Image: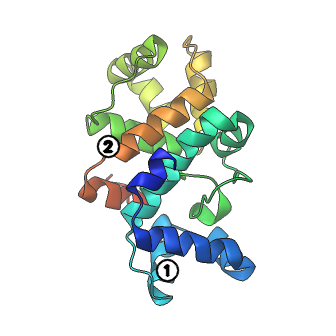
Amino acid sequence: MTEIEKIMTNSLKTFFKEIAANKSLQEKLYHTKEISDVTTIANELGFKITATEVLKAQAGRLIELSISEPKEAKLATTGKKPNLGAQWGREGGGFLESAGYWLIQLHDWKCTIQSYNPELINLFLQIDKDHELKAKINYCKTIDEVAKIAQKSGFEVSDIALLVYQALNILSLDEKNADLVAHGRHLC
């Protein structure tokens, strides 16, 4: 049993099994706009799950993919859906639309996950000081775009490292902030 399976509710596990057996449901979920839309569909089918549960399950799956199938995780960094694992919402556009915005927001929320990657630490220290860099990253749609801007700014940060950092921080979110992310609600 993987770490993410240990924290998933029975209802979410049952919902995932239903999805695996139902191609039309897979297609419907793939084209949802927000992660919260997935829960609306699930609830209509009788599954009692929250948007936060789906968001965190997806984050956990991306962490697992970054270790076991890095090529699959790389797809998520470019805004594409990995072939392995459920990444719904964003109309098939990857884990989180506006990935740069959410990286900045997670940082501004002072999430509890600290990076041990010195380049990542230095990047966020620079973001705190450099409003132009912060603005550029804020407008990135994908993690891959964030990594490219970071690299152009002199930071040796990979897209996978940023994806894992983002996913770890999402797993640490409280219910209120996780719900904001799952509903795609920008605060500004």
* Distance between mark 2 and mark 1 Cα atoms: 24 Å
Please determine whether, in this image, residue 168 is positioned above or below residue 25.
above
Compare marks 2 and 1 and give the one earlier in the sequence.
Answer: 1
Residue lying furthest front? 1
What residue is shown at x 42% (from left), y 53% (from top)?
6
Assign a secondary structure to mark 2: helix
Please determine whether, in this image, residue 13 is positioned above or below residue 149.
below
Q: Which residue is mark 1?
A: 42
Hey, which quadrant is residue 122 in on the image? Answer: top left
Q: Residues within 10 Å of mark 2 (few under 14, many from 20)?
A: some
What residue is shown at x 30% (from left), y 47% (from top)?
173
Whether residue 141 is visible, yes or no, is yes
Assign a secondary structure to mark 1: helix
The image shows a total of numbered marks equal to 2
Residue type, mark 2 in image: Ser
User: Residue 124 placed where, x, y %?
Assistant: 39, 22
Q: Nearer the viewer, residue 140 or 1?
A: 1
Residue type, mark 1 in image: Ala
User: Residue 51 placed where, x, y %?
Assistant: 40, 67
Q: Which residue is mark 2?
A: 172
What residue is shown at x 45% (from left), y 88% (from top)?
46
Please determine whether, in this image, residue 61 is positioned above or below residue 37.
above
Please determine whether, in this image, residue 134 is positioned above or below residue 51.
above
User: Residue 117 placed where, x, y %?
Assistant: 46, 16
User: Residue 160 placed where, x, y %?
Assistant: 60, 31
Q: Residues within 10 Å of mark 1 (few under 14, many from 20)?
A: many
Whether residue 183 is visible, yes or no, is no
